[in-house]
Amino acid sequence: MSTLVFLEHHGSSIQKGSLGVLSKAVSLDPDTSAVLIGSGVAPLAEQAGRYGAKQVFVADSESLEAPLPQPRVDVISRLVADKGFGNVLFAASVLGTDIAGGVSARLDAGLNWDLNDLAMDGGALVGKRSALGDTIRADVGWSSEPRLGLIRAGSFDPVESGGSASVEEISADLEDFSTKAVMVDQAHEEQTGPSIEDAEILVTGGRGLGSPEAFSLMEDLASALGGAVASTRAVVDSGWYPYPTQVGQTGKVVSPKLYIGCGVSGAIQHKVGMQTSQVIVSINKDPNAPIFDFSDLGVVGDLQTIVPKLTELVKERRGS
């Protein structure tokens, strides 16, 4: 088995999701390779080695500076064909998903998506995917090589092994049609504190807050705990809080050490996005809210009273 992992980077660091996929791949195949594509990305190869990559292929060119998918499809497709990789894995970001689909079409290769685990069976890669609203887990396979896998966000944590990787530079030969799209601008969301994918503590507000103004309570508690604020789809659809904070099947998948849900009912679509949290605490005035069925601690009561008191206690404990 030979495995290649696409490492997505933003700025001067490799994305946590990609490093998580790399760590999992290395646990199954110690000879896993990785590929970095962009402009000025060569120094990131050392980081990839620390997370277990034995070899890192680097396509470093000004023509690859913009995070556009099609040029990366060219580079990865050619690399897979030349080196004969049997497995190619991607973290399911917006860019990673776009690239995976393009590589699948280019190589006429099978792509299994929304995988939340990987295993080996008789020397062959097996993907695991949740189905029927995450009530069961199904094993999925491939009928031919290369096997392409798209891994659900938050499925694997990065594990630093302290190793080093050999580095091989590869060319950035692009198809004519791949250079037609030009990125004219790139906006970055302004935020303070960690993103909801990286935060170890999440305070999530649901429709039970009653109004968008109540999110100030979530922000105060998250600030006291050193965490981030998240939301549900109903909240986002109502325009109460921005979409990048949405957790769930149509939002982001998160795995914080502590998840605090305030006024969150716990619909299956939301559960899909946060059920792997280490500790789940729920505050809801409805004792029959579904979220209590999978919470480690449930508090039945008015969040408008409970959350400010909780915030005050946290600040007292932390001396702030």
Image (cartoon, rainbow, N blue to C red):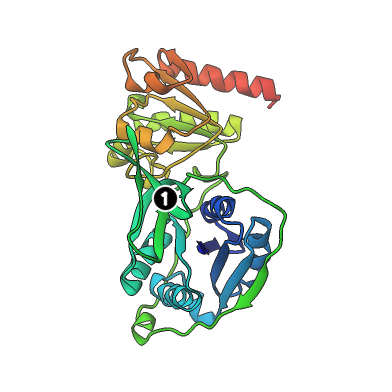
Which class describes the residues within 10 Å of circle 1: few (<14), some (14-19), or many (20+)? Answer: some
> What residue lies at 28% left-to-right and 41% top-to-bottom?
237
Examine the rendered structure and indicate whether residue 289 appears above or below residue 169: above
Above-or-below relation of 99 to 182? above
Res 186 quadrant in image? bottom left
Q: How many marks?
A: 1
Q: Which residue sits at x=56%, y=23%?
A: 311
- The C terminus lies in which quarter of the figure? top right
**Horizontal and vertical percent for residue 166?**
68, 70
Q: Label 1, on which residue?
A: 126
Residue 10 point in image, percent of width and height: 54, 62
Q: Is residue 59 left or right of residue 245?
A: right
Please state if 127 lies on the left or on the right of 20 as rendered. Answer: left
In what element is the residue under mark 1?
Answer: strand
Q: Is residue 214 left or right of residue 55?
A: left
Q: Residue at x 60, y 35 (%)?
A: 226
Name the residue type under label 1.
Val
At which x and y percent is residue 192?
56, 46
Look at the image and tell me whether residue 312 can be seen: yes
Front residue of 65 and 138: 138
